[in-house]
Image (spheres, rainbow, N blue to C red):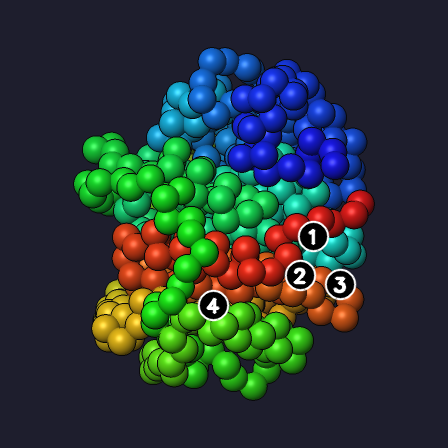
Amino acid sequence: MNLYDLTAHQLLSLIKDKKTTVQAMVDSILSRAKSVNDKTHAFVRFHDPLLSDGTCPIPIGIKDNICIQGKLATCASKILNGFHAPYDAAVIEKIKGRGGVILGSLNMDEFAFGSSTETSAYGVTRNPWDLKRVPGGSSGGSAASVAAGQTVWALGSDTGGSIRQPASFCGIVGMKPTYGRVSRYGLIAFGSSLDQIGPLTKDVTDSALLLNIIAGFDQRDSTSVNKPVPDYTKALRRDVKGLRIGIPKEYFIDGIQPEVLKAVREAIEVLKKEGAVIKESSLPHTEYAVATYYIVATAEASSNLARFDGVQYGLRALPEKTRKTTLVDMYETTREKGFGDEAKRRIMLGTYVLSSGYYDAYYLRGQKVRTLIKQDFDKAFEECDAIICPTAPTTAFKIGEKSNDPLSMYLSDIFTIPANLAGIPGISIPCGFDANKLPIGLQIMTRAFDEETLLHVAYTYEQSTAWHLERAKL
Protein backbone atom coordinates (compact mmCIF):
# COMPACT_ATOMS: atom_id res chain seq x y z
CA MET A 1 0.00 0.00 0.00
CA ASN A 2 1.17 3.55 -0.75
CA LEU A 3 2.34 5.72 2.13
CA TYR A 4 -0.42 8.24 1.37
CA ASP A 5 -3.07 5.58 2.01
CA LEU A 6 -1.80 4.87 5.53
CA THR A 7 -3.04 6.30 8.80
CA ALA A 8 -0.96 8.45 11.13
CA HIS A 9 -0.52 5.63 13.66
CA GLN A 10 0.64 3.26 10.90
CA LEU A 11 3.14 5.83 9.62
CA LEU A 12 4.45 6.53 13.13
CA SER A 13 5.06 2.79 13.56
CA LEU A 14 6.96 2.62 10.27
CA ILE A 15 9.12 5.57 11.31
CA LYS A 16 9.75 4.06 14.75
CA ASP A 17 10.77 0.74 13.14
CA LYS A 18 13.00 2.63 10.67
CA LYS A 19 11.04 1.26 7.70
CA THR A 20 10.61 4.78 6.36
CA THR A 21 11.79 8.27 7.21
CA VAL A 22 9.93 11.47 7.92
CA GLN A 23 11.41 13.00 4.78
CA ALA A 24 10.30 10.07 2.60
CA MET A 25 6.82 10.18 4.09
CA VAL A 26 6.44 13.92 3.56
CA ASP A 27 7.80 13.72 0.00
CA SER A 28 5.40 10.90 -0.88
CA ILE A 29 2.31 12.60 0.53
CA LEU A 30 3.13 16.06 -0.82
CA SER A 31 3.73 14.57 -4.26
CA ARG A 32 0.36 12.83 -4.06
CA ALA A 33 -1.31 16.03 -2.89
CA LYS A 34 0.00 18.08 -5.78
CA SER A 35 -0.55 15.39 -8.42
CA VAL A 36 -4.29 15.00 -7.77
CA ASN A 37 -5.19 18.51 -6.66
CA ASP A 38 -6.30 19.46 -10.16
CA LYS A 39 -8.97 16.78 -9.75
CA THR A 40 -10.12 17.42 -6.17
CA HIS A 41 -9.17 21.08 -5.72
CA ALA A 42 -8.91 20.35 -1.99
CA PHE A 43 -5.90 22.62 -1.38
CA VAL A 44 -6.16 26.32 -2.20
CA ARG A 45 -2.46 26.80 -1.56
CA PHE A 46 0.55 24.69 -0.61
CA HIS A 47 3.20 25.74 1.92
CA ASP A 48 6.84 24.78 1.99
CA PRO A 49 6.75 21.92 4.49
CA LEU A 50 9.11 22.50 7.39
CA LEU A 51 10.47 19.45 9.16
CA SER A 52 11.32 19.82 12.83
CA ASP A 53 11.94 17.63 15.84
CA GLY A 54 8.85 16.28 17.51
CA THR A 55 6.98 13.18 18.54
CA CYS A 56 4.32 13.41 15.83
CA PRO A 57 5.86 14.61 12.53
CA ILE A 58 2.75 13.81 10.49
CA PRO A 59 1.72 15.84 7.40
CA ILE A 60 -1.48 17.79 7.99
CA GLY A 61 -3.74 20.11 5.99
CA ILE A 62 -5.39 23.12 7.62
CA LYS A 63 -8.79 24.61 6.81
CA ASP A 64 -8.39 28.12 5.41
CA ASN A 65 -10.08 29.78 8.40
CA ILE A 66 -7.37 28.76 10.89
CA CYS A 67 -4.46 31.21 11.28
CA ILE A 68 -0.92 30.09 10.45
CA GLN A 69 1.63 32.83 11.17
CA GLY A 70 2.87 34.53 8.02
CA LYS A 71 0.54 32.58 5.73
CA LEU A 72 -2.54 33.72 3.89
CA ALA A 73 -5.78 33.10 5.80
CA THR A 74 -8.69 34.02 3.56
CA CYS A 75 -11.68 31.90 4.64
CA ALA A 76 -12.02 31.21 0.88
CA SER A 77 -13.32 34.78 0.48
CA LYS A 78 -12.23 37.63 -1.78
CA ILE A 79 -12.65 40.08 1.09
CA LEU A 80 -9.59 38.62 2.85
CA ASN A 81 -7.36 38.66 -0.24
CA GLY A 82 -3.84 39.52 0.87
CA PHE A 83 -4.42 38.96 4.60
CA HIS A 84 -1.49 37.16 6.20
CA ALA A 85 -2.07 35.83 9.70
CA PRO A 86 0.09 37.70 12.23
CA TYR A 87 0.13 34.78 14.67
CA ASP A 88 -0.46 31.03 14.97
CA ALA A 89 -3.81 29.72 16.15
CA ALA A 90 -3.59 27.76 19.41
CA VAL A 91 -4.08 24.46 17.56
CA ILE A 92 -1.26 25.34 15.14
CA GLU A 93 1.07 26.05 18.06
CA LYS A 94 0.26 22.61 19.45
CA ILE A 95 0.76 20.86 16.11
CA LYS A 96 4.07 22.62 15.49
CA GLY A 97 5.12 21.77 19.05
CA ARG A 98 4.72 18.08 18.25
CA GLY A 99 6.66 18.36 14.97
CA GLY A 100 3.62 18.32 12.69
CA VAL A 101 4.30 19.14 9.04
CA ILE A 102 1.81 21.65 7.64
CA LEU A 103 1.30 20.99 3.93
CA GLY A 104 -1.01 23.89 3.13
CA SER A 105 -4.43 25.52 3.40
CA LEU A 106 -7.60 23.68 2.45
CA ASN A 107 -10.65 24.87 0.55
CA MET A 108 -13.93 25.59 2.30
CA ASP A 109 -17.26 27.29 1.85
CA GLU A 110 -16.72 31.04 2.12
CA PHE A 111 -16.49 31.91 5.83
CA ALA A 112 -17.79 28.36 6.48
CA PHE A 113 -21.20 29.34 5.05
CA GLY A 114 -22.33 26.20 3.26
CA SER A 115 -22.73 22.45 3.13
CA SER A 116 -21.01 21.69 -0.17
CA THR A 117 -17.81 23.79 -0.56
CA GLU A 118 -19.41 25.40 -3.60
CA THR A 119 -19.44 28.93 -2.15
CA SER A 120 -15.63 29.22 -2.08
CA ALA A 121 -14.14 32.17 -3.96
CA TYR A 122 -11.45 29.73 -5.14
CA GLY A 123 -13.82 27.35 -6.90
CA VAL A 124 -15.51 24.08 -6.06
CA THR A 125 -13.85 21.15 -4.29
CA ARG A 126 -14.82 17.74 -5.69
CA ASN A 127 -15.54 14.49 -3.90
CA PRO A 128 -12.76 11.89 -4.46
CA TRP A 129 -15.37 9.11 -4.66
CA ASP A 130 -17.13 10.84 -7.58
CA LEU A 131 -15.65 14.02 -9.02
CA LYS A 132 -19.08 15.17 -10.21
CA ARG A 133 -20.29 15.37 -6.62
CA VAL A 134 -19.68 17.68 -3.69
CA PRO A 135 -17.47 16.67 -0.75
CA GLY A 136 -19.86 18.30 1.72
CA GLY A 137 -19.07 21.44 3.64
CA SER A 138 -17.99 23.69 4.93
CA SER A 139 -14.80 21.68 5.63
CA GLY A 140 -15.01 20.05 2.19
CA GLY A 141 -11.35 20.61 1.37
CA SER A 142 -10.32 19.00 4.65
CA ALA A 143 -12.50 15.92 4.08
CA ALA A 144 -11.61 15.53 0.41
CA SER A 145 -7.87 15.86 1.08
CA VAL A 146 -7.92 13.05 3.65
CA ALA A 147 -10.12 10.82 1.47
CA ALA A 148 -7.86 11.38 -1.55
CA GLY A 149 -4.63 10.69 0.32
CA GLN A 150 -3.48 14.28 -0.13
CA THR A 151 -2.79 14.57 3.59
CA VAL A 152 -2.67 12.09 6.45
CA TRP A 153 -5.15 14.05 8.54
CA ALA A 154 -6.65 17.52 8.57
CA LEU A 155 -8.20 20.18 10.76
CA GLY A 156 -11.64 21.59 10.08
CA SER A 157 -14.19 23.63 11.97
CA ASP A 158 -17.75 22.63 12.82
CA THR A 159 -20.47 25.23 13.42
CA GLY A 160 -23.51 23.20 12.37
CA GLY A 161 -22.01 19.98 11.01
CA SER A 162 -19.12 21.30 8.94
CA ILE A 163 -16.75 18.51 9.99
CA ARG A 164 -19.20 15.62 10.36
CA GLN A 165 -21.25 16.08 7.18
CA PRO A 166 -18.24 16.23 4.79
CA ALA A 167 -16.69 13.30 6.67
CA SER A 168 -19.86 11.36 5.94
CA PHE A 169 -19.85 12.34 2.25
CA CYS A 170 -16.14 11.46 1.85
CA GLY A 171 -16.09 8.19 3.83
CA ILE A 172 -13.74 9.27 6.60
CA VAL A 173 -13.91 10.01 10.34
CA GLY A 174 -14.80 13.54 11.42
CA MET A 175 -15.18 14.69 15.04
CA LYS A 176 -16.66 17.81 16.58
CA PRO A 177 -15.32 17.99 20.14
CA THR A 178 -17.34 19.51 23.00
CA TYR A 179 -17.64 23.30 22.75
CA GLY A 180 -14.76 24.62 24.87
CA ARG A 181 -12.60 21.49 24.62
CA VAL A 182 -10.37 22.87 21.83
CA SER A 183 -9.24 26.51 21.80
CA ARG A 184 -10.83 28.76 19.17
CA TYR A 185 -7.96 31.26 19.45
CA GLY A 186 -6.87 31.91 15.86
CA LEU A 187 -10.03 30.50 14.28
CA ILE A 188 -11.66 33.23 12.17
CA ALA A 189 -15.13 33.35 13.67
CA PHE A 190 -18.45 32.47 12.04
CA GLY A 191 -20.75 31.73 15.00
CA SER A 192 -18.79 32.28 18.20
CA SER A 193 -21.12 30.25 20.44
CA LEU A 194 -21.16 27.34 17.97
CA ASP A 195 -17.73 27.08 16.27
CA GLN A 196 -15.39 24.26 17.25
CA ILE A 197 -12.16 23.04 15.66
CA GLY A 198 -11.83 19.28 15.22
CA PRO A 199 -9.98 16.46 13.42
CA LEU A 200 -10.74 14.75 10.12
CA THR A 201 -8.92 11.42 9.86
CA LYS A 202 -8.86 8.03 8.14
CA ASP A 203 -9.85 6.11 11.27
CA VAL A 204 -10.91 6.51 14.90
CA THR A 205 -7.43 5.87 16.32
CA ASP A 206 -6.08 8.84 14.37
CA SER A 207 -8.98 10.95 15.61
CA ALA A 208 -7.99 10.17 19.21
CA LEU A 209 -4.32 10.91 18.47
CA LEU A 210 -5.04 14.29 16.88
CA LEU A 211 -7.50 15.25 19.61
CA ASN A 212 -4.78 14.47 22.16
CA ILE A 213 -2.63 17.09 20.44
CA ILE A 214 -5.14 19.92 19.98
CA ALA A 215 -7.35 19.65 23.10
CA GLY A 216 -6.77 21.65 26.24
CA PHE A 217 -7.42 24.88 28.11
CA ASP A 218 -6.28 28.19 26.61
CA GLN A 219 -6.66 31.41 28.60
CA ARG A 220 -6.64 33.42 25.34
CA ASP A 221 -10.03 31.91 24.49
CA SER A 222 -12.71 33.06 26.93
CA THR A 223 -14.90 30.08 25.98
CA SER A 224 -12.16 27.51 26.60
CA VAL A 225 -13.00 25.23 29.53
CA ASN A 226 -10.33 24.43 32.11
CA LYS A 227 -10.84 20.68 32.47
CA PRO A 228 -8.20 17.93 32.49
CA VAL A 229 -7.54 16.33 29.09
CA PRO A 230 -7.37 12.53 29.26
CA ASP A 231 -5.33 10.35 26.94
CA TYR A 232 -8.04 9.61 24.40
CA THR A 233 -6.20 6.62 22.97
CA LYS A 234 -6.97 4.75 26.21
CA ALA A 235 -10.66 4.88 25.26
CA LEU A 236 -9.96 2.79 22.15
CA ARG A 237 -11.20 -0.59 23.25
CA ARG A 238 -13.65 -2.95 21.57
CA ASP A 239 -16.09 -3.53 24.37
CA VAL A 240 -19.53 -1.93 24.64
CA LYS A 241 -21.18 -4.62 26.74
CA GLY A 242 -23.93 -3.03 28.81
CA LEU A 243 -23.42 0.42 27.29
CA ARG A 244 -26.78 2.12 26.73
CA ILE A 245 -27.27 3.50 23.22
CA GLY A 246 -30.26 5.69 22.43
CA ILE A 247 -31.91 5.76 19.03
CA PRO A 248 -33.79 9.07 18.70
CA LYS A 249 -37.07 8.55 16.86
CA GLU A 250 -36.99 12.13 15.53
CA TYR A 251 -33.88 11.30 13.47
CA PHE A 252 -35.46 8.38 11.62
CA ILE A 253 -37.99 10.22 9.49
CA ASP A 254 -39.46 10.35 6.00
CA GLY A 255 -37.14 11.89 3.43
CA ILE A 256 -34.00 10.03 4.42
CA GLN A 257 -32.36 8.17 1.54
CA PRO A 258 -33.41 4.50 2.04
CA GLU A 259 -29.84 3.23 1.67
CA VAL A 260 -28.72 5.60 4.44
CA LEU A 261 -31.47 4.38 6.73
CA LYS A 262 -30.62 0.73 5.99
CA ALA A 263 -26.89 1.22 6.64
CA VAL A 264 -27.49 3.01 9.94
CA ARG A 265 -29.95 0.35 11.15
CA GLU A 266 -27.41 -2.35 10.27
CA ALA A 267 -24.76 -0.42 12.24
CA ILE A 268 -27.07 -0.38 15.25
CA GLU A 269 -27.40 -4.18 14.96
CA VAL A 270 -23.61 -4.52 14.90
CA LEU A 271 -23.34 -2.63 18.20
CA LYS A 272 -26.18 -4.70 19.63
CA LYS A 273 -24.26 -7.89 18.80
CA GLU A 274 -21.22 -6.37 20.51
CA GLY A 275 -23.26 -6.18 23.71
CA ALA A 276 -24.68 -2.65 23.68
CA VAL A 277 -28.17 -2.11 25.07
CA ILE A 278 -30.27 -0.45 22.37
CA LYS A 279 -33.22 1.66 23.47
CA GLU A 280 -35.53 4.20 21.87
CA SER A 281 -34.83 7.80 22.79
CA SER A 282 -36.59 11.09 22.14
CA LEU A 283 -35.33 14.58 21.33
CA PRO A 284 -38.68 16.32 20.85
CA HIS A 285 -37.43 19.77 19.88
CA THR A 286 -35.31 18.45 16.99
CA GLU A 287 -37.79 19.78 14.43
CA TYR A 288 -36.95 23.34 15.50
CA ALA A 289 -33.17 22.91 15.33
CA VAL A 290 -32.56 24.11 11.75
CA ALA A 291 -34.75 27.21 12.16
CA THR A 292 -33.12 28.00 15.52
CA TYR A 293 -29.64 27.52 14.09
CA TYR A 294 -30.25 29.87 11.17
CA ILE A 295 -31.36 32.58 13.59
CA VAL A 296 -28.52 32.19 16.11
CA ALA A 297 -25.74 31.44 13.61
CA THR A 298 -26.62 34.22 11.15
CA ALA A 299 -26.93 36.74 13.98
CA GLU A 300 -23.45 35.86 15.20
CA ALA A 301 -22.11 35.84 11.64
CA SER A 302 -23.52 39.30 11.00
CA SER A 303 -21.78 40.58 14.12
CA ASN A 304 -18.47 38.81 13.42
CA LEU A 305 -18.26 39.83 9.76
CA ALA A 306 -18.93 43.51 10.46
CA ARG A 307 -15.16 43.92 10.96
CA PHE A 308 -14.45 43.17 7.29
CA ASP A 309 -15.03 46.61 5.80
CA GLY A 310 -11.89 47.42 3.79
CA VAL A 311 -10.22 49.39 6.57
CA GLN A 312 -7.94 46.93 8.38
CA TYR A 313 -8.14 43.57 6.61
CA GLY A 314 -7.71 42.33 3.07
CA LEU A 315 -9.63 43.83 0.17
CA ARG A 316 -10.38 47.53 -0.16
CA ALA A 317 -12.56 48.45 -3.14
CA LEU A 318 -13.59 51.94 -4.22
CA PRO A 319 -16.62 52.80 -6.39
CA GLU A 320 -16.02 53.84 -9.98
CA LYS A 321 -17.11 57.44 -9.51
CA THR A 322 -15.57 60.74 -10.38
CA ARG A 323 -16.99 62.58 -7.38
CA LYS A 324 -15.36 62.43 -3.95
CA THR A 325 -15.73 58.97 -2.39
CA THR A 326 -17.14 58.82 1.13
CA LEU A 327 -16.25 56.30 3.81
CA VAL A 328 -19.68 54.71 3.43
CA ASP A 329 -19.09 54.34 -0.33
CA MET A 330 -15.88 52.46 0.41
CA TYR A 331 -17.61 50.19 2.95
CA GLU A 332 -20.45 49.37 0.58
CA THR A 333 -18.24 48.72 -2.45
CA THR A 334 -15.75 46.61 -0.51
CA ARG A 335 -18.47 44.41 0.97
CA GLU A 336 -20.36 44.18 -2.32
CA LYS A 337 -17.27 43.00 -4.22
CA GLY A 338 -15.66 41.06 -1.37
CA PHE A 339 -18.49 38.85 -0.16
CA GLY A 340 -20.17 36.10 -2.18
CA ASP A 341 -23.91 35.58 -2.44
CA GLU A 342 -24.24 33.15 0.48
CA ALA A 343 -22.20 35.38 2.79
CA LYS A 344 -24.41 38.34 1.89
CA ARG A 345 -27.54 36.25 2.47
CA ARG A 346 -26.43 35.24 5.97
CA ILE A 347 -25.23 38.73 6.90
CA MET A 348 -28.60 40.18 5.89
CA LEU A 349 -30.54 37.47 7.74
CA GLY A 350 -28.46 37.99 10.85
CA THR A 351 -28.73 41.76 10.73
CA TYR A 352 -32.50 41.44 10.38
CA VAL A 353 -33.00 39.13 13.37
CA LEU A 354 -30.87 41.43 15.53
CA SER A 355 -32.58 44.63 14.38
CA SER A 356 -34.78 46.82 16.52
CA GLY A 357 -38.28 45.42 16.76
CA TYR A 358 -37.25 41.90 15.70
CA TYR A 359 -34.66 40.96 18.33
CA ASP A 360 -37.24 39.59 20.79
CA ALA A 361 -39.32 37.90 18.09
CA TYR A 362 -36.39 36.07 16.52
CA TYR A 363 -33.00 36.08 18.26
CA LEU A 364 -34.25 35.98 21.85
CA ARG A 365 -36.81 33.31 21.01
CA GLY A 366 -34.17 31.34 19.12
CA GLN A 367 -31.95 31.31 22.20
CA LYS A 368 -34.84 30.03 24.31
CA VAL A 369 -35.51 27.17 21.89
CA ARG A 370 -31.78 26.42 21.89
CA THR A 371 -32.04 25.91 25.65
CA LEU A 372 -34.93 23.48 25.12
CA ILE A 373 -32.83 21.51 22.61
CA LYS A 374 -29.98 21.28 25.12
CA GLN A 375 -32.41 20.14 27.80
CA ASP A 376 -33.64 17.39 25.44
CA PHE A 377 -30.10 16.00 25.30
CA ASP A 378 -29.61 16.35 29.06
CA LYS A 379 -32.76 14.31 29.64
CA ALA A 380 -31.87 11.71 27.00
CA PHE A 381 -28.43 11.18 28.53
CA GLU A 382 -30.06 10.31 31.87
CA GLU A 383 -31.28 7.15 30.11
CA CYS A 384 -28.40 6.40 27.75
CA ASP A 385 -24.64 6.80 27.36
CA ALA A 386 -24.56 7.60 23.65
CA ILE A 387 -26.98 8.53 20.88
CA ILE A 388 -26.76 7.13 17.35
CA CYS A 389 -28.35 8.40 14.14
CA PRO A 390 -27.46 9.18 10.49
CA THR A 391 -24.89 11.93 9.97
CA ALA A 392 -26.66 13.23 6.87
CA PRO A 393 -30.03 12.36 5.29
CA THR A 394 -28.40 11.51 1.94
CA THR A 395 -25.09 10.61 0.37
CA ALA A 396 -23.14 13.24 -1.59
CA PHE A 397 -25.24 15.15 -4.11
CA LYS A 398 -24.11 16.42 -7.50
CA ILE A 399 -22.27 19.70 -7.89
CA GLY A 400 -24.82 22.41 -8.67
CA GLU A 401 -27.79 20.27 -7.64
CA LYS A 402 -28.76 22.46 -4.67
CA SER A 403 -26.99 25.72 -5.50
CA ASN A 404 -30.23 27.58 -6.25
CA ASP A 405 -32.18 26.04 -3.40
CA PRO A 406 -30.79 27.40 -0.11
CA LEU A 407 -33.44 25.71 2.05
CA SER A 408 -32.67 22.28 0.60
CA MET A 409 -28.96 22.96 1.14
CA TYR A 410 -29.54 24.00 4.76
CA LEU A 411 -31.45 20.76 5.44
CA SER A 412 -28.26 18.79 4.62
CA ASP A 413 -27.21 19.57 8.20
CA ILE A 414 -30.50 18.65 9.86
CA PHE A 415 -28.96 15.81 11.92
CA THR A 416 -25.71 17.57 12.85
CA ILE A 417 -26.95 21.02 13.92
CA PRO A 418 -28.48 19.94 17.29
CA ALA A 419 -25.08 18.90 18.70
CA ASN A 420 -23.70 22.39 18.04
CA LEU A 421 -26.71 24.08 19.63
CA ALA A 422 -26.29 21.84 22.70
CA GLY A 423 -22.48 22.11 22.77
CA ILE A 424 -21.98 18.32 22.93
CA PRO A 425 -19.42 16.21 21.03
CA GLY A 426 -20.28 14.25 17.91
CA ILE A 427 -18.44 12.02 15.47
CA SER A 428 -19.17 10.66 12.00
CA ILE A 429 -17.70 7.32 10.98
CA PRO A 430 -18.14 5.31 7.76
CA CYS A 431 -20.91 2.69 7.89
CA GLY A 432 -21.48 1.65 4.28
CA PHE A 433 -22.08 2.72 0.70
CA ASP A 434 -25.07 3.36 -1.51
CA ALA A 435 -25.66 1.83 -4.96
CA ASN A 436 -23.38 4.47 -6.53
CA LYS A 437 -20.48 3.52 -4.23
CA LEU A 438 -20.91 6.75 -2.28
CA PRO A 439 -20.04 6.65 1.44
CA ILE A 440 -22.63 6.74 4.23
CA GLY A 441 -21.88 8.17 7.67
CA LEU A 442 -22.98 7.05 11.13
CA GLN A 443 -23.20 9.80 13.76
CA ILE A 444 -22.55 9.19 17.45
CA MET A 445 -23.16 11.83 20.16
CA THR A 446 -22.37 11.78 23.88
CA ARG A 447 -22.52 14.05 26.93
CA ALA A 448 -20.43 17.20 27.04
CA PHE A 449 -16.74 16.45 27.64
CA ASP A 450 -17.31 12.72 27.27
CA GLU A 451 -15.24 12.26 24.12
CA GLU A 452 -13.91 9.07 25.69
CA THR A 453 -17.27 7.30 25.40
CA LEU A 454 -17.69 8.81 21.94
CA LEU A 455 -14.39 7.30 20.76
CA HIS A 456 -15.07 4.06 22.64
CA VAL A 457 -18.35 3.43 20.77
CA ALA A 458 -16.91 4.60 17.45
CA TYR A 459 -13.86 2.37 17.80
CA THR A 460 -15.95 -0.67 18.69
CA TYR A 461 -18.12 -0.25 15.61
CA GLU A 462 -15.13 0.50 13.38
CA GLN A 463 -13.22 -2.58 14.50
CA SER A 464 -16.32 -4.73 13.98
CA THR A 465 -16.55 -3.71 10.31
CA ALA A 466 -14.23 -2.95 7.40
CA TRP A 467 -15.71 0.27 6.01
CA HIS A 468 -12.81 2.39 7.29
CA LEU A 469 -10.36 0.36 5.18
CA GLU A 470 -11.99 1.46 1.90
CA ARG A 471 -10.18 4.13 -0.08
CA ALA A 472 -11.38 6.39 -2.88
CA LYS A 473 -9.71 5.57 -6.18
CA LEU A 474 -8.83 8.64 -8.22
Query: Front-most of 19 and 362?
Result: 19
Quadrant (top left/top right/bottom left/bottom right) for the N terminus: top right
Quadrant (top left/top right/bottom left/bottom right) for the C terminus: top right
Whether 360 is drawn above or below 177: the answer is below
Read off the residue under disc 3: 437
Q: Position of residue 16 (x, y in %)?
A: 54, 22
Question: Quick check: can you spot residue 107?
Answer: no
Query: Front-most of 381 and 30?
Result: 381
Q: Earlier in the sequence, mark 3 or mark 4?
A: 4
- Looking at the rendered structure, the number of numbered marks drawn on it comes to 4
Label of residue 470 in the image? 1
Which residue is painted at 36% across and 44% down in the image? 234
Q: CA distance from mark 2 to mark 1?
A: 10 Å
Q: Earlier in the sequence, mark 4 or mark 2?
A: 4
Q: Nearer the viewer, mark 3 or mark 4?
A: 4
Secondary structure state at the residue bearing disc 2: strand
Which residue is painted at 50% across and 72% down in the image? 273
Secondary structure state at the residue bearing disc 3: loop
Asked if marks 2 and 1 touch (Cβ < 8 Å), the reply is yes
Whether 437 is drawn above or below 228: the answer is below
Q: Quadrant of residue 135?
A: bottom right
